């Protein structure tokens, strides 16, 4: 069985080296030495000022919304995973969906201003598939209208715009280190900010608002453990190798699919891309569904990332977003993982070719 992704696991002995330290110290959670080490390495690797590890990418969004004290309406993208909009609603804010553009599939910055009302407190875009949003334009709109910006960077690990980390834009950026993401700690995530005051607030929010016996604010349990950090310490040195390998897989897919009526996102020239997903846009939903079925008959499970367009979720009454709805209906993410060989790629592309040429 082939899934859309296959979680990388390091050699067990390597993980055990870290476990030995945990067994010696008996320090298993509460921001122990492995969490501290991973935070420092991630800050250096990504080139960001403040980074706090948290237990997942959803709580990262929630504490970001809380720390910025957001109220009322948050303008966000409908083309994302449900976690983005769920965290807005969970924090008692109202999502207002802004349609996407069809080159990068990120929020269409030219449509944001029309949606701003006196209730708007923030913009929450997603660097979808790791493609950066129009961060400069979004930054200007936010400044002109006194709005906060949180970027959901769940897919954007390692992505740079003109050599600068994509996480250096907005008030806060969040990441997910879930097992399905490019860099993983099994479960995990992080919040990133330039602002030291905000970082202090996030630090307290992460662990019940206190340090030792001094209580400062409300807080929640958003901590991660030493076991999760150990997985991150094993995986981090491999990331640039992972990205190189995924780039090759991406190019092979495009080579074998090049004569078919399929569309892909354009990778902008001025970015360093991480090749976190391989989304393919079919001409129609029916065509996509028939190919998905054929893959499934061969035990290959491609996934509908991202479907449905979040404005169409049953518990949301969202405005219509035609670009997002159309693209969500016809997109399929093909299997992409490290260790995938060319033979598997041709098995998949042959099934797609046969499916579209019938
Ligand atoms: C995976 C993901 C999240 C949530 O991350 P978890 O670590 O699973 O909570 C949030 N936003 C997007 C866009 C994601 O893909």
Image (cartoon, helix red, strand yellow):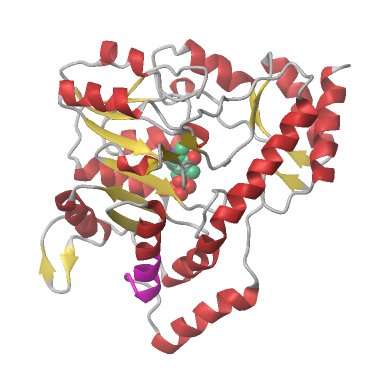
Which stretch is magenta?
30-38
Quadrant of the image containing the C terminus = top right
Quarter of the figure with residue 210: bottom left
Write the residue at 41% across / 47% down. 175
State left or right for residue 177 relative to residue 4: left
Magenta region includes residue 35: yes
113 is higher (above) or lower (below) than 231: above
Q: Position of residue 313 (x, y in %)?
A: 47, 25
| Visible residue check, residue 335 | no
State left or right for residue 105 relative to residue 196: right
State left or right for residue 171 relative to residue 110: left
Q: Position of residue 306 (x, y in %)?
A: 55, 29
Write the residue at 46% across / 42% down. 159
114 is higher (above) or lower (below) than 248: above
| Visible residue check, residue 84 | yes
Q: Position of residue 157 (x, y in %)?
A: 46, 47
Magenta region includes residue 275: no
Write the residue at 60% across / 19% down. 329
Write the residue at 48% across / 20% down. 312
Q: Position of residue 81 (x, y in %)?
A: 49, 35
Q: Nearer the viewer, residue 10 or 89?
A: 10
């Amino acid at each position: 069985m082939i899934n859309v992704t296959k979680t990388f696991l390091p050699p067990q002995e390597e993980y055990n080296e870290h476990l030995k330290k945990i067994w010696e110290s008996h320090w298993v959670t509460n921001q122990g030495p492995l969490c501290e080490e991973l935070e420092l390495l991630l800050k250096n690797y990504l080139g960001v000022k403040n980074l706090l590890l948290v237990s997942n990418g959803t709580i990262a969004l929630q504490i970001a919304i809380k720390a910025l004290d957001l109220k009322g309406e948050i303008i966000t993208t409908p083309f994302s995973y449900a976690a983005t909009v769920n965290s807005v609603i969970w924090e008692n804010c109202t999502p207002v969906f802004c349609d996407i553009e069809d080159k990068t599939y990120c929020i269409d910055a030219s449509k944001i201003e029309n949606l701003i009302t006196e209730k708007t407190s923030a913009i929450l875009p997603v660097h979808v598939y790791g493609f950066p949003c129009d961060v400069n334009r979004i930054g200007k709109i936010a400044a002109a209208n006194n709005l906060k910006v949180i970027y959901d960077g769940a897919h954007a690990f390692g992505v740079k715009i003109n050599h600068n980390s994509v996480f250096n834009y907005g008030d806060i950026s969040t990441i997910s280190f879930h097992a399905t993401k490019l860099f993983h700690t099994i479960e995990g995530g992080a919040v990133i900010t330039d602002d030291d005051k905000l970082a202090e607030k996030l630090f307290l929010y992460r662990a019940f608002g206190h340090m030792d016996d001094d209580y400062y604010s409300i807080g929640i349990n958003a901590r991660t453990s030493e076991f999760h950090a150990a997985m991150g310490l094993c995986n981090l040195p491999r990331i640039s190798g992972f990205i190189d390998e995924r780039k090759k897989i991406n190019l092979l897919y495009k080579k074998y699919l090049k004569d078919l009526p399929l569309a892909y996102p354009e990778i902008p020239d001025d970015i360093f891309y991480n090749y976190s997903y391989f989304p393919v846009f079919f001409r129609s939903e029916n065509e996509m569904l028939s190919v998905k079925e054929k893959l499934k008959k061969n035990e290959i499970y491609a996934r509908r990332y991202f479907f449905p367009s979040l404005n169409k979720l049953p518990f949301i009454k969202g405005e219509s977003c035609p670009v997002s709805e159309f693209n969500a209906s016809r997109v399929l993410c093909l299997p992409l993982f490290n260790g995938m060989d060319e033979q598997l790629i041709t098995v998949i592309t042959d099934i797609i070719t046969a499916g579209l040429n019938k």
